[in-house]
Amino acid sequence: MELTSRMKMARFQTFWIQIWKNKPLDESSQTSGDENDILLNIKIYDLTVLVVANPANTNALILKEYAPSIPEENITSLTRLDHNRALSQISENLKVHVGDVRNAIIWGNHSSNLYPDANHATVDIGAGHKPVKELIADDQWLKTEFITNVEQRGQAIVNARRLSSAFSTASAACDHMRDWILGTPKGTWVSMGVYSDGSYGIQPGLIYSFPVTCKKGEWSIVQGLKIDEFSREKMDAVERELIEEKTMAYSCLH
């Protein structure tokens, strides 16, 4: 890594949080007094937070409740693992290198109801990038098997190996932090669970996975993407799931 990149990374204090792992939502929402004190005393503006433990989106929301001194834009949750799996599914279908595929999207929650969207994804064919929907002339596959494969990939790994996808998760966390801190390549976006500002009609305040670009340690939600009826239904369904999680969590917190 170049010296300038190392210096740039050193400006950030990265705080990885795995909270209340393997607990139901109603239990994970009940923090201890010690945990509350630790979170309330965090006052580092440059702190960058990646929440990994599920339910990651809502755990990130809980963190925001208990660490109000951390700016909301500094709290994120991990959907990069799902994003990477979506790129992999496309590359396998088209028999191209996964590095040639970009701009898939994970909308919403890191759960079995997440929505992997290939409508805006492209593939580098050597003479420029071509839309995935033009290369995969099978809309049914994109609306069924592709989505199911991404949603259920984690469980498939557990069933096959009797082990979790911990290494893939760690790699995705590294990808998430690298792009957040060092920036996304020009013309490329990634998926991150971030604080909704109302973009694409998603309720403000939710931690929701959007397509984002990153520059100088800051993320921005990609705007102006066309959302078809199928995608709208999927996005709204996962939004409802997150609202239900938020309601349950807040009922335990207050």
Image (tube, rainbow, N blue to C red):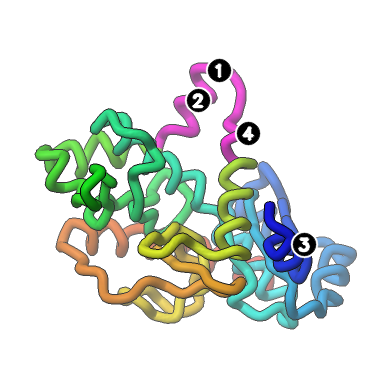
The answer to which quarter of the image holds residue 235 is bottom left
Callout 3 touching callout 2 (CB < 8 Å): no
Tell me the crowding category of disc 3: few under 14, some 14 to 19, or many 20 or more residues within 10 angstroms, Cα based.
some
Q: Disc 3 or 2, which lies upstream in sequence?
A: 3
Asked whether residue 163 is drawn in magenta, I would say yes
Disc 2 is placed on an element classified as helix
Give the CA distance from mark 4 to mark 3: 28 Å
Give the CA distance from mark 1 to mark 2: 6 Å
What residue does disc 1 label?
Answer: 161
Q: Residue at x 44, y 66 (%)?
A: 212
What residue does disc 4 label?
Answer: 167
Give the CA distance from mark 4 to mark 2: 12 Å
What residue does disc 3 label?
Answer: 31
Callout 1 touching callout 2 (CB < 8 Å): yes
Disc 3 is placed on an element classified as loop
Examine the rendering and report whether any part of residue 86 can be seen.
Answer: no
Give the CA distance from mark 3 to mark 1: 33 Å
Q: Position of residue 134 (x, y in %)?
A: 12, 46
Tell me the crowding category of disc 1: few under 14, some 14 to 19, or many 20 or more residues within 10 angstroms, Cα based.
few
The chief SS type of the magenta part is helix
> Hey, what amino acid is under mark 1?
Arg
In this picture, residue 29 sits left or right of residue 187: right
> Hey, what amino acid is under mark 4?
Phe
Q: Which residues are magenta?
A: 152-169
Give the CA distance from mark 4 to mark 1: 13 Å
Callout 4 touching callout 3 (CB < 8 Å): no
Q: Disc 4 or 3, which lies upstream in sequence?
A: 3
